[in-house]
Image (cartoon, rainbow, N blue to C red):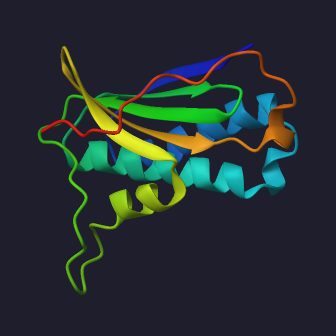
Amino acid sequence: MCQQFQQSFDGDHTAPRRSRAAVRAELTAVLSDTAQTPFLDDALLVISELVTNAVRAGSDPLTVATNLHKAELEIAVLDHGAGWPVLQPPEHGSDHGRGLAIIEAVARSWGTERRAAGKAVWAVLALPADLTGSVPCTPAARSATPAP
């Protein structure tokens, strides 16, 4: 069984909080003992960063999608905002610009895909085997090559 979740949110300042709450509820219903695992914290952090980037890019609405596979969790945010995310060093003293570096630090891989209307920015997190037991499905095929 693969577990899939998808929900759209208004692209406003509440989107990161609302998307974290929705995905937390979904993951804790499926996985065992996730409330005490760093995995759930990492997943929610990635969601928060990806959704915040979509909101800052002006996307309204945006969609959060997760796909739970046997060995990984794929998280994607689909948006219609302008531009493409680019990993850059943050400016000294700036409160912004660290999101993709955080995602790169906690995710197995991340990237972007061009969509008919906008883009999808995704990240894949390794799933500790003790969280799901046996999930008979396979990881999604992804390429970590960012779009221009």
Image coords of residue 144 (percent x, y): 35, 39
Image coords of residue 53 (percent x, y): 30, 49
In this view, 142 is above or below 104: above
Classify the position of the C terminus by image quarter: top left
Image position of 67 (left or right of 13): right
Task: Tell me the quarter of the picture where residue 33 sits.
Answer: top right
Classify the position of the N terminus by image quarter: top right
Q: How many marks?
A: 0
Please tell me which residue lies in front, 77 or 112. 112
Write the residue at 64% across / 19% down.
Answer: 138
In this view, 64 is above or below 84: above
Task: Tell me the quarter of the picture where residue 96 sits.
Answer: bottom left
Image coords of residue 2 (percent x, y): 68, 16
Image position of 24 (left or right of 113): right
In this view, 23 is above or below 17: above
Write the residue at 66% across / 25% down.
Answer: 69
Image position of 32 (left or right of 106): right
Write the residue at 60% across / 19% down.
Answer: 4
Please tell me which residue lies in front, 136 or 14. 136
Image coords of residue 87 (percent x, y): 25, 58
Write the residue at 29% across / 42% down.
Answer: 54
Which residue appears farthest toward the bottom when viewing the image?
93
